[in-house]
Amino acid sequence: MKITVLLENSKFKGSNLNIEHGLSMFIEKNGFNVLFDLGGSKECGIKNAAILGIDLSMVNIVAISHGHSDHTGGLMKFLEINDNAQVYVKKEALYPHYSKRPEGMKYIGMNGEIVEKYPDRFIFVNETTEIAQNIFLVPQINKNYSIPSCNQILFAEEDKKLVNDTFEHELFMVIENNDNLIIFSGCGHSGIKNIVDTAKNLFPDKKIESVIGGFHLQAGSLDYALADEEEIEDIANWLKSEVSGQIYTGHCTGERGMNLMKPILKDRLERIYTGMKIIF
Protein backbone atom coordinates (compact mmCIF):
# COMPACT_ATOMS: atom_id res chain seq x y z
CA MET A 1 0.00 0.00 0.00
CA LYS A 2 1.26 3.45 -0.95
CA ILE A 3 0.01 6.76 0.43
CA THR A 4 0.84 10.10 -1.17
CA VAL A 5 0.04 13.28 0.76
CA LEU A 6 -1.39 15.57 -1.92
CA LEU A 7 -1.90 18.39 0.54
CA GLU A 8 -0.93 19.31 4.08
CA ASN A 9 -0.24 22.75 5.53
CA SER A 10 3.51 22.40 4.99
CA LYS A 11 6.10 21.31 2.44
CA PHE A 12 9.86 20.94 2.19
CA LYS A 13 11.81 24.10 1.47
CA GLY A 14 12.34 24.40 -2.27
CA SER A 15 9.43 22.12 -3.16
CA ASN A 16 7.41 23.19 -6.21
CA LEU A 17 4.19 21.89 -4.68
CA ASN A 18 1.34 24.14 -3.55
CA ILE A 19 0.21 24.44 0.06
CA GLU A 20 -2.78 25.80 1.96
CA HIS A 21 -4.50 24.90 5.21
CA GLY A 22 -6.05 21.52 4.46
CA LEU A 23 -5.53 17.81 3.99
CA SER A 24 -5.76 15.35 1.11
CA MET A 25 -4.27 11.87 0.70
CA PHE A 26 -4.12 9.52 -2.30
CA ILE A 27 -4.04 5.83 -1.37
CA GLU A 28 -3.12 2.99 -3.73
CA LYS A 29 -3.85 -0.57 -2.61
CA ASN A 30 -4.02 -3.66 -4.80
CA GLY A 31 -4.76 -1.64 -7.92
CA PHE A 32 -7.54 0.34 -6.20
CA ASN A 33 -7.25 4.12 -5.77
CA VAL A 34 -8.88 6.04 -2.92
CA LEU A 35 -8.81 9.77 -2.34
CA PHE A 36 -9.22 10.67 1.33
CA ASP A 37 -10.32 14.31 1.57
CA LEU A 38 -9.71 17.02 -1.01
CA GLY A 39 -8.05 19.97 0.68
CA GLY A 40 -9.04 23.62 0.67
CA SER A 41 -10.70 26.11 -1.62
CA LYS A 42 -7.50 26.96 -3.52
CA GLU A 43 -7.61 23.40 -4.91
CA CYS A 44 -3.93 22.89 -4.07
CA GLY A 45 -4.37 19.13 -3.65
CA ILE A 46 -5.76 18.87 -7.18
CA LYS A 47 -2.90 20.96 -8.58
CA ASN A 48 -0.32 18.92 -6.71
CA ALA A 49 -1.67 15.66 -8.09
CA ALA A 50 -0.88 16.92 -11.60
CA ILE A 51 2.63 17.99 -10.56
CA LEU A 52 3.24 14.58 -8.95
CA GLY A 53 2.02 12.72 -12.02
CA ILE A 54 -1.08 11.31 -10.31
CA ASP A 55 -4.03 10.92 -12.67
CA LEU A 56 -7.13 11.76 -10.63
CA SER A 57 -9.38 10.40 -13.37
CA MET A 58 -8.19 6.96 -12.21
CA VAL A 59 -9.48 7.43 -8.65
CA ASN A 60 -12.10 4.78 -7.84
CA ILE A 61 -13.60 6.22 -4.65
CA VAL A 62 -13.50 9.46 -2.66
CA ALA A 63 -13.96 9.43 1.12
CA ILE A 64 -14.79 12.73 2.84
CA SER A 65 -13.93 12.75 6.54
CA HIS A 66 -16.19 15.66 7.53
CA GLY A 67 -17.95 18.71 6.18
CA HIS A 68 -15.34 21.46 6.56
CA SER A 69 -14.04 23.40 3.58
CA ASP A 70 -10.36 22.61 4.25
CA HIS A 71 -11.19 18.96 3.49
CA THR A 72 -13.80 19.46 0.75
CA GLY A 73 -12.57 22.53 -1.13
CA GLY A 74 -11.24 20.60 -4.13
CA LEU A 75 -14.30 18.38 -4.55
CA MET A 76 -16.03 20.36 -7.30
CA LYS A 77 -12.87 20.45 -9.40
CA PHE A 78 -12.29 16.75 -8.80
CA LEU A 79 -15.76 15.85 -10.08
CA GLU A 80 -15.02 17.81 -13.25
CA ILE A 81 -11.88 15.72 -13.76
CA ASN A 82 -13.22 12.32 -12.74
CA ASP A 83 -16.45 11.00 -14.30
CA ASN A 84 -16.86 7.79 -12.32
CA ALA A 85 -15.71 7.84 -8.69
CA GLN A 86 -18.42 7.76 -6.05
CA VAL A 87 -18.09 10.18 -3.12
CA TYR A 88 -18.74 8.61 0.29
CA VAL A 89 -19.72 11.06 3.02
CA LYS A 90 -22.07 11.40 5.95
CA LYS A 91 -25.23 13.32 5.06
CA GLU A 92 -24.67 15.62 8.03
CA ALA A 93 -21.50 16.87 6.31
CA LEU A 94 -23.73 18.84 3.93
CA TYR A 95 -25.18 20.95 6.75
CA PRO A 96 -23.84 24.50 7.36
CA HIS A 97 -20.79 24.73 9.64
CA TYR A 98 -19.11 27.77 11.17
CA SER A 99 -16.02 28.83 13.11
CA LYS A 100 -16.14 31.58 15.73
CA ARG A 101 -13.47 34.19 15.06
CA PRO A 102 -12.69 37.54 16.75
CA GLU A 103 -14.38 39.28 13.82
CA GLY A 104 -17.48 37.05 14.02
CA MET A 105 -18.75 33.75 12.65
CA LYS A 106 -17.04 32.44 9.52
CA TYR A 107 -18.70 29.88 7.24
CA ILE A 108 -16.43 26.83 6.90
CA GLY A 109 -18.86 24.31 5.45
CA MET A 110 -19.02 22.49 2.11
CA ASN A 111 -20.10 24.14 -1.09
CA GLY A 112 -23.76 23.07 -1.26
CA GLU A 113 -23.85 23.49 -5.04
CA ILE A 114 -21.71 20.37 -5.47
CA VAL A 115 -24.47 17.94 -4.52
CA GLU A 116 -27.00 19.88 -6.59
CA LYS A 117 -24.76 19.63 -9.65
CA TYR A 118 -23.62 16.02 -9.11
CA PRO A 119 -26.42 14.32 -7.11
CA ASP A 120 -25.71 10.87 -8.54
CA ARG A 121 -22.09 10.86 -7.43
CA PHE A 122 -22.77 10.85 -3.69
CA ILE A 123 -23.29 7.88 -1.39
CA PHE A 124 -24.30 8.73 2.18
CA VAL A 125 -23.02 6.34 4.83
CA ASN A 126 -24.43 5.86 8.32
CA GLU A 127 -22.94 2.49 9.24
CA THR A 128 -19.56 0.83 8.84
CA THR A 129 -19.16 0.18 5.12
CA GLU A 130 -16.55 -1.82 3.19
CA ILE A 131 -16.02 0.40 0.14
CA ALA A 132 -13.42 -1.95 -1.37
CA GLN A 133 -11.70 -5.12 -0.25
CA ASN A 134 -10.27 -4.49 3.26
CA ILE A 135 -11.06 -0.75 3.09
CA PHE A 136 -13.74 0.44 5.53
CA LEU A 137 -15.44 3.73 6.36
CA VAL A 138 -16.62 4.13 9.95
CA PRO A 139 -19.27 6.83 10.49
CA GLN A 140 -20.37 5.96 14.03
CA ILE A 141 -17.64 6.97 16.48
CA ASN A 142 -17.86 5.95 20.14
CA LYS A 143 -17.39 8.82 22.58
CA ASN A 144 -15.83 7.01 25.52
CA TYR A 145 -13.12 9.65 25.87
CA SER A 146 -13.23 13.44 25.80
CA ILE A 147 -13.32 15.30 22.50
CA PRO A 148 -10.74 18.01 21.61
CA SER A 149 -11.13 21.21 23.62
CA CYS A 150 -10.43 23.19 20.42
CA ASN A 151 -13.89 22.19 19.18
CA GLN A 152 -15.34 24.92 21.39
CA ILE A 153 -15.11 27.49 18.57
CA LEU A 154 -16.85 25.26 16.01
CA PHE A 155 -20.58 25.38 15.35
CA ALA A 156 -23.26 23.71 13.25
CA GLU A 157 -26.60 25.07 12.12
CA GLU A 158 -29.70 23.24 13.36
CA ASP A 159 -33.25 24.58 12.89
CA LYS A 160 -31.76 27.92 11.81
CA LYS A 161 -29.85 28.19 15.09
CA LEU A 162 -26.11 27.82 15.70
CA VAL A 163 -25.19 25.13 18.22
CA ASN A 164 -21.87 23.67 19.34
CA ASP A 165 -20.78 21.12 16.74
CA THR A 166 -20.98 17.53 18.00
CA PHE A 167 -19.36 16.22 14.80
CA GLU A 168 -22.02 13.78 13.78
CA HIS A 169 -20.74 14.61 10.27
CA GLU A 170 -17.33 12.99 10.86
CA LEU A 171 -16.16 9.55 9.75
CA PHE A 172 -12.79 7.84 9.55
CA MET A 173 -11.25 5.19 7.31
CA VAL A 174 -9.65 1.88 8.25
CA ILE A 175 -7.54 -0.25 5.91
CA GLU A 176 -6.60 -3.83 6.78
CA ASN A 177 -2.97 -4.33 5.84
CA ASN A 178 -1.25 -7.68 6.49
CA ASP A 179 -3.71 -8.45 9.30
CA ASN A 180 -3.07 -5.08 10.94
CA LEU A 181 -5.08 -1.85 10.79
CA ILE A 182 -4.12 1.55 9.36
CA ILE A 183 -6.43 4.33 10.58
CA PHE A 184 -6.99 7.53 8.59
CA SER A 185 -8.28 10.60 10.43
CA GLY A 186 -9.20 13.87 8.75
CA CYS A 187 -9.14 16.16 11.78
CA GLY A 188 -10.10 13.88 14.64
CA HIS A 189 -12.76 16.30 15.89
CA SER A 190 -14.43 13.34 17.62
CA GLY A 191 -11.16 12.71 19.44
CA ILE A 192 -8.33 10.57 18.10
CA LYS A 193 -8.61 8.35 21.19
CA ASN A 194 -12.29 7.76 20.40
CA ILE A 195 -11.47 7.00 16.77
CA VAL A 196 -8.79 4.44 17.65
CA ASP A 197 -10.99 2.97 20.39
CA THR A 198 -13.87 2.56 17.92
CA ALA A 199 -11.59 0.77 15.46
CA LYS A 200 -10.35 -1.55 18.22
CA ASN A 201 -13.93 -2.51 19.11
CA LEU A 202 -14.90 -3.09 15.47
CA PHE A 203 -11.83 -5.21 14.74
CA PRO A 204 -10.97 -6.81 18.12
CA ASP A 205 -8.64 -9.40 16.63
CA LYS A 206 -6.48 -6.84 14.78
CA LYS A 207 -3.57 -4.68 15.93
CA ILE A 208 -3.60 -0.94 15.29
CA GLU A 209 -0.41 -0.63 13.26
CA SER A 210 -0.54 3.04 12.39
CA VAL A 211 -2.61 6.24 12.60
CA ILE A 212 -2.39 8.89 9.89
CA GLY A 213 -3.98 12.35 9.86
CA GLY A 214 -4.97 15.30 12.03
CA PHE A 215 -5.65 15.23 15.79
CA HIS A 216 -7.19 18.73 16.15
CA LEU A 217 -4.95 20.11 18.86
CA GLN A 218 -5.05 23.58 17.32
CA ALA A 219 -7.83 25.33 15.42
CA GLY A 220 -6.02 26.36 12.24
CA SER A 221 -3.54 29.14 12.91
CA LEU A 222 -5.64 30.55 15.76
CA ASP A 223 -3.47 30.87 18.85
CA TYR A 224 -6.49 31.29 21.13
CA ALA A 225 -7.86 27.82 20.33
CA LEU A 226 -5.16 25.46 21.56
CA ALA A 227 -5.29 22.21 23.49
CA ASP A 228 -3.49 22.47 26.82
CA GLU A 229 -0.31 20.54 27.53
CA GLU A 230 -2.01 17.95 29.73
CA GLU A 231 -4.52 17.10 27.00
CA ILE A 232 -1.79 16.70 24.38
CA GLU A 233 0.50 14.62 26.59
CA ASP A 234 -2.40 12.37 27.57
CA ILE A 235 -3.15 11.69 23.89
CA ALA A 236 0.51 10.96 23.16
CA ASN A 237 0.83 8.51 26.06
CA TRP A 238 -2.41 6.77 25.12
CA LEU A 239 -1.38 6.40 21.47
CA LYS A 240 2.00 5.08 22.59
CA SER A 241 0.28 2.19 24.33
CA GLU A 242 -2.48 1.51 21.79
CA VAL A 243 -0.70 1.86 18.43
CA SER A 244 2.02 -0.66 17.64
CA GLY A 245 3.82 1.23 14.86
CA GLN A 246 4.28 4.71 13.43
CA ILE A 247 2.04 7.69 14.07
CA TYR A 248 1.89 10.20 11.21
CA THR A 249 0.25 13.53 11.94
CA GLY A 250 0.09 17.15 10.90
CA HIS A 251 -2.51 19.66 9.66
CA CYS A 252 -4.67 20.57 12.69
CA THR A 253 -2.33 18.85 15.14
CA GLY A 254 -0.15 21.95 14.83
CA GLU A 255 3.53 22.51 15.51
CA ARG A 256 2.92 22.97 19.22
CA GLY A 257 1.07 19.68 19.41
CA MET A 258 3.86 17.93 17.51
CA ASN A 259 6.51 19.42 19.78
CA LEU A 260 4.70 18.32 22.95
CA MET A 261 4.07 14.79 21.71
CA LYS A 262 7.58 14.23 20.34
CA PRO A 263 9.37 13.63 23.69
CA ILE A 264 6.78 10.94 24.50
CA LEU A 265 6.49 9.21 21.14
CA LYS A 266 10.05 9.94 19.99
CA ASP A 267 10.90 8.30 16.63
CA ARG A 268 7.45 6.75 16.37
CA LEU A 269 5.99 10.20 15.64
CA GLU A 270 6.42 11.58 12.12
CA ARG A 271 5.16 14.84 10.69
CA ILE A 272 3.31 14.56 7.40
CA TYR A 273 3.93 17.15 4.70
CA THR A 274 2.78 17.89 1.17
CA GLY A 275 4.35 15.42 -1.25
CA MET A 276 5.24 12.85 1.42
CA LYS A 277 5.01 9.17 0.45
CA ILE A 278 4.30 6.45 3.01
CA ILE A 279 4.60 2.79 2.09
CA PHE A 280 3.34 -0.18 4.09
Image: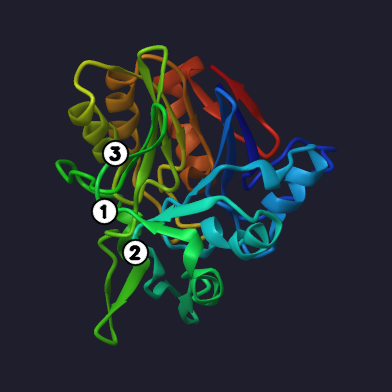
Q: Earlier in the sequence, mark 3 or mark 2?
A: 2
Question: What separation in Å lies between label 3 and label 2 (alpha carbons)?
Answer: 19 Å
From the image, tell me which residue sits under label 3. 195
Where residue 229 sits, quadrant-wise, is top left
Label 3 neighbour load within 10 Å: few <14, some 14-19, many 20+? many
Q: Residue at x 27, y 59 (%)?
A: 168
Quick check: 180 above or below 114?
Answer: above
The residue tagged 1 is 126
Query: Label 1, label 3: how many angstroms apart (C-alpha)?
Result: 16 Å
Mark 2, residue position: 91
Classify residue 277 by image quadrant: top right
Q: Amino acid at mark 1?
A: Asn
- x then y, percent, for residue 152: 31, 63
Mark nearest the camera among 3 and 2 is 2
| Image quarter in which the N terminus is found | top right
The way the protein has been coloured in the rendering is: rainbow
Q: Tell me where residue 247 appears, x and y as whole percent.
A: 45, 25
Q: Are marks 1 and 2 in contact (CB under 8 Å)?
A: yes
The amino acid pointed to by label 2 is Lys
In the displayed structure, does residue 59 sit left or right of residue 234? right
Element class at badge 2:
helix
Q: Which numbered disc flags the more N-terminal residue, 1 or 3?
A: 1
The answer to whether marks 1 and 3 mark residues whose Cβ atoms lie closer than 8 Å is: no
Tell me the element at label 1.
Answer: loop
Indicate left or right for 239 with 77 as reference. left
Report if residue 251 is visible in the image. yes
Between residues 51 and 233, which one lies in front from this camera angle? Answer: 51
Residue at image point 71% right, 56% down: 81
The image quadrant that residue 32 belongs to is: top right
